Image: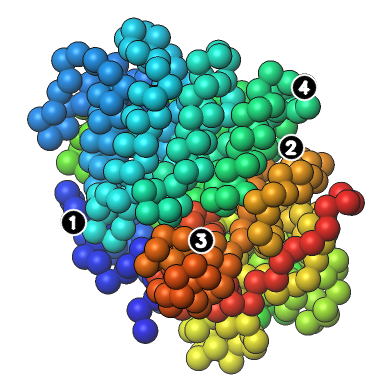
Amino acid sequence: MVIKENSNHDSNAFGRIYLKGKSDYGIVVSNDLKNAVDENILYIHDKEHFSNTINCISISLKILIKNGAYSKGTHFTKINSLIDVMTIAIIAVINIETEISGGLTFVNFDQEIAEIIEEYELKDDKKLIKSAVKMFFSIINSSNARVDGSPYISVSIGVVDSVLAGEICDTILEVLRDGTDDNMPYIFPNVQFRVTNKHHMSGSTDENNFLNALKTTAIQMNPTYLICNSEANKNINPKDIHVVGCRSRLYKTKNGTNPIGAGRANIGVISINLPLLALTSKDLEVLKNRLRIYMDISVKGLRDKRNYIKHNKQLHSQTILNNNLLVPHNKSYEDMLDNASISIGFIGGYEAAEIMNKMDTDVSKIFKTLENIILFMNEYCEKKSTELDDIITLIGVSGEGLSYKFLEIDRKHWNMKNDRGFYTNSFHVPVDFKLRVSEKLRFESPFHRLCTGGGISYIEISHVEENIKGLKDVIEIAKRNNIHYLGFNFDKNVCKNCNSPTFNFEKCETCGSNDIIKIRRVSGYLGYLDSFSYGKKLEENIRIKHCGTNKG
């Protein structure tokens, strides 16, 4: 069986980096790291491109337009319309996505479109704006920039300071809400709506943008929500808050200052198999000592990767360089790499804590133990960042194919017991636990602060198209629980024959066809259920809806 690391992509594809090709990670990493990978303790994400590219990056649309689109010989000498702007953005996306292994995010997308329109004196007619945004969404959604699927593109919206920017925000939401011409949701770009007390509470200036975002989510499952007043985000300018990939958070620079937003990158991610370490540790102190060893190995591996790329200029993204996308934060590509984060992830937090609790089924006790473990990992990252003058972060990774892969090997070699067939993603509550919304978010709350490199909580809900208040109530609960990033999951099915939505999983209620496309949230992104990895299909099959929003 082929294990797909990302459930939106086909791991049989020749590879993600087409300009550079696959790499031999062994030329970079130590024997300790290779041995830990072979022992199923560590996992190198995007291993096939470990030695030739960075993981993900955030960029500014304004800077891209200012510097033109030089890649592949295309150069706009004059910007005449928003269609030109979106064309340049598409060219840049396609080129950059052949030069990195992860995601790309346009920071402050709605506000910067408005500023571009004003600076270049473009027409601000709503129909023209909607047409340009729809073109961008449609091409990105269908692009084969990667052999293994559409590019991993996100845009952050929702925090605006002009009437025009607010209108553009609503237009983006309208395009997202309308979906594709054949009534499918846009899988990409992933839209991140930033919620602030100032902008989106009752009576605030941009409350309607927020309500339109909720209306869109109720239909299409997107946007996801970045909660700017949470503990993790409260000291950051809301305009700069975003995630890249499905959850990576570029939260500070080497000198400890808050991020400037665009021009930030992540070098890569190495994840730890927490259940296996727990199984082979007699108590928490032994587990922590072993964690320290494997985190040391991971940090060294990622720093070695950075240095290798830094000193081999042929591995630097020419699209980023040609369009000067390093600014405003960096002076050179090397400077960008120096200020890029490196991330340690983990899989199976719940199972590891359960093992440490001698399989005690008390969920509160298990999560107290898990918090103890993750606090140790967080403190390690903070201390090591200071020691090495680096940005070392802890990330609650998605797991996707990895949650199954780790367990499959552990069952074979360690007789690991697990009835679900996969490890739980990062710090999440197991998907088959029947909990109220407030309970789930309360359990996961501490980890949004501790996972400085990112994480997401999601709520499983029933069809909510008419229940905007229910979604708003959930976000209020998330705010009270200091949730940094939140998504909503529900069953979305579309008949491929007549393009009608259907609540019947197997047969269209309109035309009777059995050709039903099932869209689900795999982790941070939407995906087609048929393309999910085996482990993620197991997970989706046992997910239980969360209920109740009257307490928080």
Residue at disc 1, secondary structure: loop
Q: Determine the CA span between mark 3 and mark 4.
A: 34 Å
Residue at image x 66%, y 59%? 463
What residue do we see at 24% from left, 53% from top? 144
Kind of residue at disc 1: Gly
Q: Is residue 410 left or right of residue 152?
A: right
Q: Which mark is residue 203?
A: 4
- Give the residue type at disc 3: Pro
Number of the front mark, 2 or 3: 3
Which kind of residue does numbered mark 2 sit on?
Glu
Residue assigned mark 2: 231
Q: CA distance from mark 4 to mark 1?
A: 53 Å
Q: Amino acid at mark 4?
A: Gly
Q: Are marks 1 and 2 in contact (CB under 8 Å)?
A: no
Please tell me whether residue 479 is drawn above or below residue 344 in the rendered image: above
The kind of secondary structure element at disc 2 is: loop
Residue 316 visible:
no
Task: Judge left or right: residue 493 versus residue 373.
Answer: left
* Mark 1 lies on residue: 21
- Give the residue number, with chain letter if any, for mark 3: 501
Colour scheme of this structure image? rainbow
Give the x, y percent position of residue 519.
Answer: 49, 63
Q: Secondary structure at mark 4?
A: loop
> Which percent across, then down, holds residue 497?
37, 67
| Circle 2 Cα neighbour tier, 10 Å, few/some/many (<14 / 14–19 / ≥20) | some
Identify which residue is drawn at 36% across, 48% down.
Answer: 181
Instruction: Tell me the CA gap for discs 1 and 2.
Output: 41 Å
| Residue drawn 79% across the image and 81% down it | 358
Q: With respect to residue 27, does 162 lie above or below?
A: above
